[in-house]
């Protein structure tokens, strides 16, 4: 009898335990969803209340007609031969800055990547090398945490309006980022050939040349072209400091309210960005590697075979282009070695130390830091909204077998929507955030909101492209299986595609938030709020000791956002693998 009772109780106990586990799992899931919702809602509400205090005027009604004039003039761009010659010359200058800046960044990145890579060193490096690597790693983190526009403003105070300013402003932060990616790429290459050469007694440099670089070369080459694509956008942004190029012409035309000239210059920026985009995209897809979204998130080790002919032609064109850019430009390294440059550099360093608080003291600094964070949060909200609306249409769909016989009109409409969405994203990311900020300041009063709107439009173009590329790689077999058993198409897509799509969106949103924190310095230069505005004001007043403490504050905010973003991405990744 006891045995019977025990036998009955055993299953019931097991059922009870299972039900308890299910109840616990349900509560855990609900708790996680509530925490995730709070992580989204609370910062967004806080940022909105900080940007738009109760009773504050936001819209500048007197400037709305200027926005109308700007939009109406899009139908009448300036196409006179004289101005088109100016645009062509500015385009050449922008390309020159981007090419030379990218080449310098790649040189810095290759040297730093070799130093930081674990695969490039045999077993354990000496103590001196480990100490040097730690120092270089810290210097590179500091270098890439400062926006290229801030670097340009600092270099202008030493070199003046020299074209070398633009090259160095691109080379330093891009070189620091490239060193990180190159080191990760070299460490991701299979170490078998390199280890075999080392065991056979090969010298270190030949071993690296034959055992490591051949496998990593496609990835390194692909990332180099991706960096060039980013450098074109940065070269346009740097025009705000007056070193030339399309960015400077855009700022001049906006300030003088020559709207027809603005649209001509915007068209030139779009054509330049589209050409670089198509070029680097074809190289990544046909020769090497990975998508732009993979590089942005640091996943650059997924190699696949491709066509080497396009890469060889691209490399040859790059070498010829760099030679032509160097010969045709006014960039000279003599400014770095001149006694006057060293004298001005010494004065700048003396002026920057010891650090001093901005006018208004700690309250002013304490006001600027949350303004910067609020601006980045609202900007990412705008960017995510743009991505959700345009991303599904911008991606290249992979049709199931049942879609092969779809109506031609439907396929034509889908293609038209895709190219429209991609064109919109191209426009958003090609126009510099400084230009978006100037336009926003025509219709809005200065503060957090116009800066957030400008950064949101610009970041939306980038985030939309990254997420659309990531969504193209989603496995659609679960969706097709659901459709095969009669599930409606929208329900099958929602059940099988939305969860991984949401994961990609969250991952790249966190990544772009880190970049957006640094980009707040760009819109601050033209009058938005935050640390960027304080940087611009104190640089204009030559209060370099205050600039130091503002750079330290920007560095701290950037590092904090990077660490937080990394922890959240790791949590999302761990949750996705469960």
Image (cartoon, helix red, strand yellow):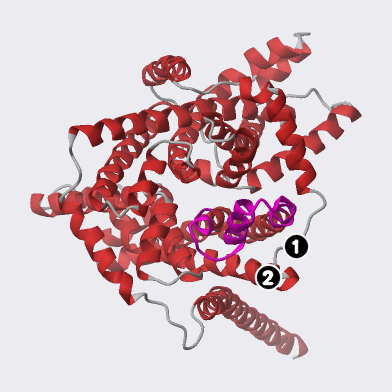
- Residue for badge 2: 364
State which quadrant residue 291 falls in.
Answer: top left
Q: Quadrant of the C terminus?
A: bottom right
In whole angstroms, how far apart are the C-alphas of marks 2 and 1? 9 Å
Q: Position of residue 378 (x, y in %)?
A: 49, 69
Q: Secondary structure at mark 2?
A: helix
Residue 479: image quadrant is: bottom left
C-beta proximity under 8 Å, tags 2 and 1: yes
Compared with 260, 291 (above or below) is above
Labels 2 and 1: the sequence-earlier one:
1
Apparent side of residue 123 relative to residue 281 in the rendered image (left or right): right
Q: Position of residue 192 (x, y in %)?
A: 67, 22
Q: Residue at x 51, y 32 (%)?
A: 223
Magenta region, main secondary structure: helix
Callout 2 environment at 10 Å: few (<14), some (14 to 19), or many (20+)?
some
Q: Is residue 373 above or below residue 462?
A: below
Residue 188 falls in image quadrant: top right
- Between 164 and 303, the residue placed more toward the observer is 164
Image-based side of 36 in relation to 322, left or right: right
Would residue 118 be visible to someone looking at this image? no
**Residue at 84 percent of width and 28 percent of height:** 129
Does residue 525 show up magenta in the picture? yes
Image location of residue 296, percent across then percent down: 52, 45
Query: Magenta segment range?
Result: 522-551
Badge 1 marks a residue whose secondary structure is loop
Residue 68 in view (yes/no): yes
Q: Between residue 514 and residue 80, name the one nearer to us.
A: 80
Question: What residue sits right under mark 1 in the picture?
Answer: 357
């Amino acid at each position: 009898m006891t045995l019977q009772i025990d036998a009955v109780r055993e299953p019931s106990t097991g059922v009870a335990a299972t039900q308890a586990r299910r109840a616990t799992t349900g509560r855990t899931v609900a708790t996680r969803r509530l925490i995730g919702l709070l992580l989204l809602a609370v910062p967004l509400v806080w940022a909105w209340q900080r940007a738009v205090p109760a009773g504050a005027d936001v819209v500048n009604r007197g400037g709305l007609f200027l926005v109308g004039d700007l939009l109406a003039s899009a139908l009448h761009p300036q196409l006179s031969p004289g101005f088109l010659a100016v645009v062509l010359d500015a385009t050449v200058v922008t390309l020159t800055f981007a090419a030379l800046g990218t080449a310098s960044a790649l040189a810095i990145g290759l040297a730093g990547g070799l130093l930081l890579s674990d695969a490039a060193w045999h077993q354990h490096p000496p103590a001196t090398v480990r100490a040097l690597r730690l120092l270089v790693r810290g210097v590179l983190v500091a270098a890439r945490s400062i926006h290229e526009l801030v670097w340009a403003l600092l270099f202008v105070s030493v070199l003046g309006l020299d074209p070398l300013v633009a090259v160095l402003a691109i080379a330093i932060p891009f070189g620091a980022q490239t060193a990180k990616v190159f080191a990760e790429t070299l460490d991701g290459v299979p170490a078998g050939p390199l280890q075999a050469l080392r065991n056979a007694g090969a010298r270190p440099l030949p071993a690296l040349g034959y055992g490591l670089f051949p496998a990593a070369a496609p990835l390194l080459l692909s990332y180099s072209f991706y960096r060039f694509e980013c450098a074109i956008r940065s070269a346009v942004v740097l025009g705000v400091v007056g070193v030339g190029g399309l960015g400077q012409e855009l700022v001049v035309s906006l300030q003088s309210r020559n709207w027809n000239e603005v649209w001509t210059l915007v068209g030139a920026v779009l054509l330049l960005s589209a050409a670089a985009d198509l070029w680097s995209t074809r190289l990544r897809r046909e020769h090497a590697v990975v998508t732009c979204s993979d590089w942005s998130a640091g996943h650059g080790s997924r190699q696949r075979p491709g066509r080497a002919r396009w890469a060889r032609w691209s490399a040859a064109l790059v070498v010829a282009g760099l030679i032509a850019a160097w010969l045709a430009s006014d960039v000279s390294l003599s400014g770095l070695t001149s006694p006057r440059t060293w004298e001005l550099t010494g004065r700048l360093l003396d002026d920057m130390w010891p650090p001093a608080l901005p006018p208004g003291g700690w309250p002013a600094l304490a006001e600027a830091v949350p303004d910067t964070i609020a601006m980045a949060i609202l900007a990412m909200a705008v960017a995510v909204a743009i991505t959700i609306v345009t991303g599904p249409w911008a991606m290249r769909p992979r049709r199931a077998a049942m879609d092969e016989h779809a109506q031609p009109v439907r396929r034509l409409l889908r293609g038209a929507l895709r190219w429209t969405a991609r064109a919109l994203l191209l426009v958003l990311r090609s126009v510099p955030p400084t230009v978006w900020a100037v336009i926003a300041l025509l219709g809005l009063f200065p503060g957090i909101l116009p800066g957030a709107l400008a950064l949101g439009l610009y970041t939306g173009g980038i985030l939309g492209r990254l997420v659309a590329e990531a969504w193209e790689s989603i496995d659609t077999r679960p969706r097709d299986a659901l459709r095969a058993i009669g599930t409606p198409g929208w329900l099958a897509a929602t059940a099988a595609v939305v969860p991984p799509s949401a994961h990609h969106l969250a991952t790249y949103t966190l990544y772009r938030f880190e970049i957006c924190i640094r980009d707040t310095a760009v819109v601050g230069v033209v009058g938005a709020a935050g640390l960027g505005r304080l940087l611009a004001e104190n640089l204009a007043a030559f209060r370099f000791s205050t600039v130091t403490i503002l750079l330290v504050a920007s560095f701290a905010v950037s590092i904090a956002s990077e660490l937080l973003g990394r922890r959240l991405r790791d949590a999302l990744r761990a949750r996705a693998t469960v």
